Image (cartoon, rainbow, N blue to C red):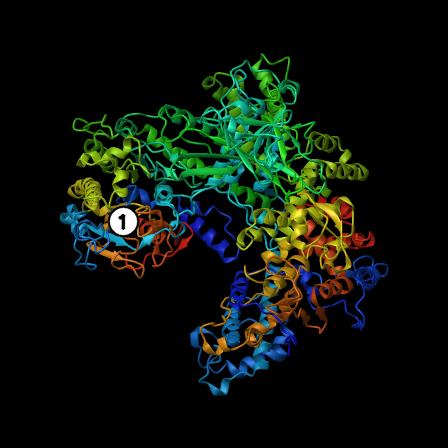
Amino acid sequence: MRTLSNPTMHSANLLLGGLLLGGLCLVVLPLGSVVGSEPETPSVREITKPESLQSARQSGRNNSRMLRQRDSAGGTAAAEASGIPEANLDDFQRFVSPILNQSCLPCHGPLRSEGQLRIDALSPDLIQGADSEKWREVYNAVGNSEMPPEDEPACQLSDEDRVRIIDWISQELSKAPIAVRDKTQSSSFRRMTKYEYRNALEDLLSVSLSTTNRLPQEVASEDGFKNSSALLQMSAMQFETHRDIGLDALHRAIVLGDRPEPVRYRISMLDQIGKPPSKKKKPKDSEFFDKDDSDYDKKRRGRVLLNLETGQGIAFQEGSASPIAEPSEEKPTEEELGAVSPVVLVLPASNEVKWNLDRFLPDEGTMRVRIRVGRSNSNPQQHAALRLIFSAHTSNDANFSQVISQHDIPVIASADKPECICFDIQLQDIQRNPFRKLATTFPRRDEFLSIRNVSNAKGQDDPLCVWINDIEITAPYYESWPPKSHTDIFLPSNSYADEAVYGREVLSKFLRRAWRRSVSPAELEPFMELFSKYRPEFSSFEAAMTEVLAAGLASPEFLYITQRDASTGDPAGQQTISLIELASRLSFFLWSSIPDEELLDLAEQGSLANPSVLKEQVIRMLADPRSSRLAETFVPQWLGTDGLDSVTHITDGSLKESMREEPIAFFREVLSSNSSCLDFIHSPYVVINETLANHYRIAGVSGPEFRKVALEESAHRGGILTNAAVLAMNSDGKDSHPLKRGVWMLKRILQDPPPPPPPNVPEVDLTDPEILKMSLKDRIADHRNKPACVSCHAKIDPWGIAFENFDAMGKFRTEIQGQPIDAKSLLLNKQELDGIEGLKRFLLVHRQDQLCRSMVDKLCGYALGRPMTSADRAQVDRITLEFRKQDDRLGDLIQLIVSSNLFKSR
Amino acid sequence: MSRKNALWKRRQFLQGTGLALSLPWLETYAKTHRVESQTPRRFVSIYHPDGVGLPLKTDPAWKDWSWFPRGGERDFELTKVLDVLEPLRNDITIYSGLSHPAARTVHGHSNADQYLTGATIGGHGPYKNTVSVDQVYAMHIGEATRHASLVLSTNGGIGGPRGAQTQSFNSEGRPIPAMNKPKDVFDMLFVTSNKDAAARLARSKSALDLLIANTKALNRELSSHDQQTLQQYLDAVRDTEVKLTKAQKWIDTPFPTVDTKYLTLDAEPKEARLYFQTMYELIYLAFLSDSTRVATFQLGRENGEGPHDLLSLAVGLGPAHGLTHAVKQPDGWKNLGTYNRYQVEEFSRFLHRLKETSEPSGDGNMLDNTFAMHGSASSSFHLSRNYPILSAGGKNFGFSNGRYLKFGKGNEDNQAGAGIDTDSGWQGKVEVEELPLSQMFVTVLQRLGVETDSFGGVQGTLTGL
């Protein structure tokens, strides 16, 4: 009987477990799952003394069947059991059919067919046959002990027989989706995802966009990937939204008319100190403090204006500013700000200062906020960063406030040599005060900008403050005029005066970048015709052309990652994509965006066919800042960390953000150092920031940026399995959730998702007094002993129970309510997992091939924008073997994938 | 299979696979062919700020000036606040025990924004709203009428976050600016053709033609499998084209002619009676001419002040918002009740107008084909619970009137929160059970013909409605 000998799961919420499984019920089993039942355990080695995780990694490598067999089996050792899964008719005939005939046939057979079901007429082939839905009903009815009916004593099933029926149906059902997936033709031809679309527009037009949020969320595939071709739909509403966003993005990039006169505020603290605070009287002398005051040291570290020369200061609450009236300068420089003022605004940790800007900020354009600021001390343990908040209070209870800066910007400079920090905010993208243009004064029209010091400084002994010298606000701000975004489209040209000629120049250049290929003169013609139609309605060439370019951005040539069918030409073309398509595939893989000029040029010249050129390009692209998107988009999809959005028990926003970031930062570290992917399972280091270090109780980490930190032996961390994000999102909000954690392990790491559960999993009835009397452990055992539950739970639970030392926040613990934690569990093959270390050790010793293959499969699926099928199996295996031979290094894996035939296939 | 069914099926399919929806859910509401041929079904919602009078039973004012009726479902007795509705008794339904759960402990002044949306907007910090129920129906109507909806308020515009001056929010949760000048409303409905819109439409049409040609050219170079993927894009462009064609049709259709002599189109809110009557008459005319089937109208704004707080002058009282603060003054309940009575009086005039007019297509009277609701997002002083809501009409699509419906539990006599006049009232613990107002919206949407089983994140209909 497959039960767990040591069930220590204490999760109170089995009901939730049922719901969770209900949600997963149509999960498709990927191919790799055939390895699910412990294939790599030739002989269970008696481990008397647990080996270190480091040496476990080495012995696991020695265990690798793939590496051992590579010479004899020509590199396809892992390809056993490949191909479309077949129905297990043998087991049906031998075991299942006799039981069914005994217990079901009397009512569901030739004599009577209750419920219009004839069990003998169902095709036992659930893959090719037509009766898999009927079998699912049988599965539910038998599994839930609804059938055979209690009042038919002759038909009763023994538990053993019941389990046999359920196991067989469950296994067969789990094969069917694989077969379906493999029969469904899949292609990498797809629409750009929402995030790719945003990146592409931003890269193409050099603008900043948040308007793409208007598009609906993408659906994730069973593997969690949002770029899966079959799921990227296009509806009329999406199409129209794409058109709107495209036109709006062009309007941001293109400027018409003269340079607009900017509104500019300049706030010098020198001016402020003598000035009355907002709408109040000039401060009295008695409100000032100075060096002679007994509590001077304390006062000067409050939120005050401080004259560094005289030592005099005054508390500061809130300021106000009016635009300055002076001719606009082309490009205000640092020097113009003048000498460092002797007066600074002292902003202590976690304090905010608010400026009333009245109602003069323009409706749109970039608002540049430049703050000249320094640190009050150079203590490396303390850090400070600035954040901007925009707000209005239009009337009693009608108010809003919103963080408008995308990232906090750290203050690095010392107070004696302050430096400027710049924020660029798109005014049309933030919540504004809708009353700002009223002629009357109620509701209030003014808008407020607050600057916040985000800092870890605390304590009495000289805590770090930031000292602000002056603030300058300019809107709309342009680096140059016309801006680069404009001149990139409307290039200087000798043919500017001839609209027909210049129009073609503009279009040809623009469409080449947008469509990622050269556009023939014939293809330009319809666009020029459109231009001729529009031109009379607009006052300028640029305004009319903007609308035409918008059509180019609404075209499938932009919105879709195309791959043309070259079957008419080169016979090899059937199999592989063209070089220009390769350039796009590569850039969408590494940058989640369109290729740049260099990559397009190399593709069009044909040099991208040269493996060393391709390799150089990968190196170049990974060094480019745009490659940060690889980790940012791949990792959350791979690990499903969007799940953090739906948990509510992490109330500290910055902790939640740090949790979200950790696996991304870890992936980046592994990639940039070209380390082994087995680091994801365990590493002697973590990649964390101060927030997470506090959470993990790791000393000596200060500051919000992520960095590699070596771990002590007893740290219980390392790798991604113990990331707080993973543990916290797989909890029920109060406590750990072993079931969720187990399912997560199987799906995301081992790529061996559990079989489909019945849709109506029996719930634990917490109103039943008999059930309430039981201990949690008994309840779980009771639940598991139901035949419908056992086969799933025995597969899932042990993986989750091994995580029991981590609570709902992902913190390490050794006891729950005074009881020591028992995180031991037995896998189906009786292999014991002893806590997280035991689990890691088991994976490293026995499952390396599976882990590596899973990594390759996931990255390939992401790179190609479609799930891997059995047709890809040999290729995936080949890459995995090479990957294993090269010590499982992540950087090498990217190169292996890009240079593979798979990556070039359509 | 109709296009709408196809969309619906596709959505169901995706749900069935256990995936999140890939189609924006709102799109499944969009347009049907049937809408155009059937007798119009209309939706109108009137919002008034500042709630109503809710004295304690022990208060002498309770008998006359409590907003909610006394008695049971059929034998209810209207107080002086609502007795103007007595002649329409069999055409109205009064509700208690409904509110939006997320707002129950948020100050009433912040809540006009969420009355028709049910969004969790909170009381401070970042602000995000969601689609309002009228706009869901407007999307369903699509281009079957010249205007998708008529959005009105006395103050006009959008107001500010948590200080809305419009009741309508689009599918992205953005406020739709309300019109407040009768002349502008009239011109939009019956006079002015929007030339810019016509030019924009023409440009869009040319662009779509180009994109279709462009797509076909690409299509020829794709594998047959990829052609199927691209087909979806092509369908999307063609759907958009159909929409444009319908919009174009309205530009080319002459406006209905309307007698304007009796309308005072320059009425201003300070002339409350005239202004109200003109605005209601415009809604009536818009419905009569089938220029739109959806309207919202917000009277004043929460936390009054300013000229629009003076609507209460019509009944000889001081600023409306002040009335809610002065309930414990002599005649306080009576004054607030008198003002509320006046609002309902204007509403009932509008209902009579609809009732007395035969449906142009011949099916009963206009009220029978209109669901008209009237309410506020607070009951007692700043208290965002037990919204005082009444509705009228809708007989021809399933509404059975002449009833007082009590929902929820534990507050059958509407005494929870009664008599409060301090802020500890609205901040107090929620001790009685109320049902989500969004359930009523689901029922209303379904009866209007929208296929949905949820609204604002709330599943299910209002049992008993």
Name the residue carrying label 1: B389
Residue sitting at x 78%, y 72%: A44
Quarter of the figure with residue B57: bottom left
Q: Specify whether residue A866 is in view.
A: no
Question: Which part of the image, by quadrant, shows the C terminus of chain A?
Answer: top right
Quarter of the figure with residue B114: top left
Choose between B11 and B226: the one closer to the eye.
Answer: B11
Residue with the most extreme right position = A71
Coordinates of residue B27 in the picture (x, y in percent)? 43, 45
Image: A462 above or below B448 = above
Choose between A762 and A111: the one closer to the eye.
Answer: A762
Query: In terms of secondary structure, where does tag 1 sit?
Result: strand
- Amino acid at circle 1: Ile
Coordinates of residue B175 in the picture (x, y in percent)? 40, 37
Quarter of the figure with residue B153: top left
Image: B372 above or below A790 = above
